Amino acid sequence: MTISLQGKTFVVMGIANKRSIAWGIARSLNRAGARLILTYNRDRMQKNVQALAETLERDDTIILQCDVSKDESIERCFQEIKEKVGTIHGLAHSIAYANKEDLEGEFVDTSREGFLLAHNISSYSLTAVARAAKELMAEGGSIVTLTYLGGERVVKNYNLMGVAKASLEASVRYLANDLGKDDIRVNSISAGPIRTLSAKGVRDFNSVLNEIEERSPLRRTTTAEEVGDTALFLLSDLSRGITGENIHVDSGFHIVSI
Ligand code: NAD
């Protein structure tokens, strides 16, 4: 069955470059005919996002800045979306950040400042953007965020980000419960490791990829396209009975023990 999102509008947050998982999501949504609003964080990313958007071959894509660590930036961004399109049908949140030094050494040494920063950007931001997006989802909607196995289990070198992902995954459940009465669904995708800009912050990332290739049921690493297609499913009506769920797109690695 093909999925059509013709006539629907989706916000995709978190494209830094062509390797970003958010870009994989944007391409899957574009293939299904969706209109896209792409948001980026810093000015220097605007050119990248603009160039990528041109490859979508649509003339109605909107590109906006949104720094999720600032309430006024989120407010401005969603006000602009309201003025430009009115109603949106879904949102993909593909955003995380932690200081590199907090991903090294031991979790027990995490600073208060580093802890709060990682949780602010990687977890709280979902709640902040869900609240803003809800106002524009008059016809119901679907929200998807990105998490990792390190939120469920101790994964070497993932440290603080694992704790932030656990908070993000719990937020998905509470948001799903709050927003369900407005016919808004909230789910997460737990992606296998993919070589992106963010992944550069994780030490020994190559050996993580090797392990997935050797030990995952599918014996291969995850691609942004695979994650994009699952996001497409979760953002479409095909998944209309699913909310508060976490779907692993990781070649099955999460089921494997030593
Ligand atoms: P990426 O670096 O391409 O994307 C991360 C994005 O977060 C960037 O676009 C960055 O600009 C954005 N961001 C950071 N701080 C922000 C802020 N204050 N405001 C707005 N945006 C901000 O890397 P990615 O791997 O595509 O990461 C996307 C998501 O996928 C993250 O949540 C990440 O934890 C998750 N994830 C990644 C992997 C992986 O192996 N790459 C695996 C599982 C989950």
Image: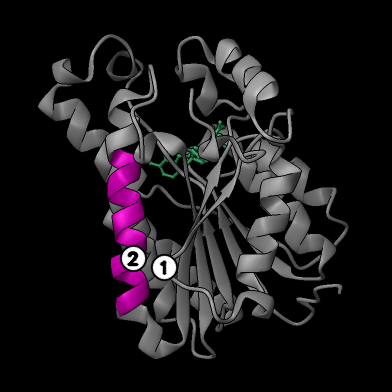
Instruction: Evaluate if marks 2 and 1 touch, with contact meaning CB atoms under 8 Å apart.
Output: yes
Q: Residue at x 38, y 24 (%)?
A: 158
* Outermost residue to the front: 258
Q: Is residue 144 left or right of residue 101?
A: right
Q: Which residues make up the magenta segment?
A: 164-177
> Which residue carries the number 1 mark?
244
Q: CA distance from mark 2 to mark 1?
A: 5 Å
Residue 54 percent coordinates (x, y): 82, 50
The kind of residue tagged 2 is Arg
The residue carrying pointer 2 sits among few (fewer than 14), some (14 to 19) or many (20 or more) residues within 10 Å by Cα, namely: some
The residue carrying pointer 1 sits among few (fewer than 14), some (14 to 19) or many (20 or more) residues within 10 Å by Cα, namely: many
The residue closer to the viewer here, 25 or 108, is 108
- Residue 102, above or below 182: above
- Residue 137, above or below 159: below
Quadrant position of residue 219 = top right
| Mark number displayed over residue 173 | 2
Residue 62 appears in the picture as rendered: no
The mark that comes first in sequence, 2 or 1, is 2
